[in-house]
Amino acid sequence: MPPNDPCQSLHELLATMHILRSPGGCPWDAEQTPESLAPYILEEACEAIEAIESGAPARIVDELGDLLLQIVFQAEIFAERGIFDFADVAAGINAKLRRRHPHVFAGRTMAKSTEELSRQWEHIKREEQAAQPASLPPSGHLPGHLPALQRAQKLVSRAWRAGLPQQQDLPPRPHNTTINEEELGQALLTLVQQAEVSGLDAEQVLRRALRKIFLDSGQRHMDESSNA
């Protein structure tokens, strides 16, 4: 069987979505809004992750398709409103990839290490965000739906890559100390058990700690900068 042509397959998917939303199509699809569909994005993303972890190609294809559907669905609704369409979404992410990889597309000298590439990525990202309207989320903000543990690791990683000063309430960064997967899993499980014994919600406790450390100190930094 010859491989599917990606452009043709995508064109057919977009056409199918348009028909489903058009008069005579599917009533359920037609009544959906970006807000009503938003929860499905998170659900389908989680199912795609589970499929990838399963290692089953057929399941991965199916779940990635479900995730792609959410993007196509959202783009179709906004296209109907005359705001943007799928082509704008694809062009936007393509342009972003090229901006953030100048060592590949802009003829710059190749960075020497992944750490240098990470710093370059963060620098370009901050420049982009500084040029955005003030109504957009400030640099460093993450989606509120992220689980606290995932949010914590991303915030810490961003702070380290950006070379930000040590947060006042954050434990010192460990040096030359590693832990394997099993040890880390056991340590995290022990903390969850301690939370259960203490009648605490581990998710909410970590969220509050992150808010105190990163958001409060970020606001202090902004206040200090404005008074300087």
Image (tube, grey):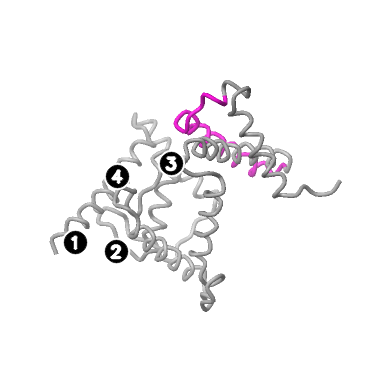
Q: Position of residue 194 (x, y in %)?
A: 38, 36
Mark 4 crowdedness (10 Å alpha carbons): few <14, some 14-19, many ≥20: some
Whole-number angstrom distance, CA of label 2 to CA of label 3: 24 Å
Q: Position of residue 23 (x, y in %)?
A: 59, 24
Mark 1 crowdedness (10 Å alpha carbons): few <14, some 14-19, many ≥20: few
Element under disc 2: loop
Q: Is residue 112 left or right of residue 198?
A: right
Instruction: Identify the residue position indicated by label 4 in the image.
Output: 211
Instruction: Identify the residue position indicated by label 2 in the image.
Output: 165
Q: Is residue 91 left or right of residue 24?
A: left
Segment colored magenta? 29-56
**Which kind of residue does numbered mark 1 sit on?**
Ser
Instruction: Identify the residue position indicated by label 1 in the image.
Output: 225
Tell which circle, 1 or 2, labels the residue nearer the N-terminal end.
2
Whole-number angstrom distance, CA of label 4 to CA of label 3: 13 Å
Tell which circle, 2 or 4, labels the residue nearer the N-terminal end.
2
> Residue 7 lies in magenta, yes or no?
no
Instruction: Identify the residue position indicated by label 3 in the image.
Output: 146
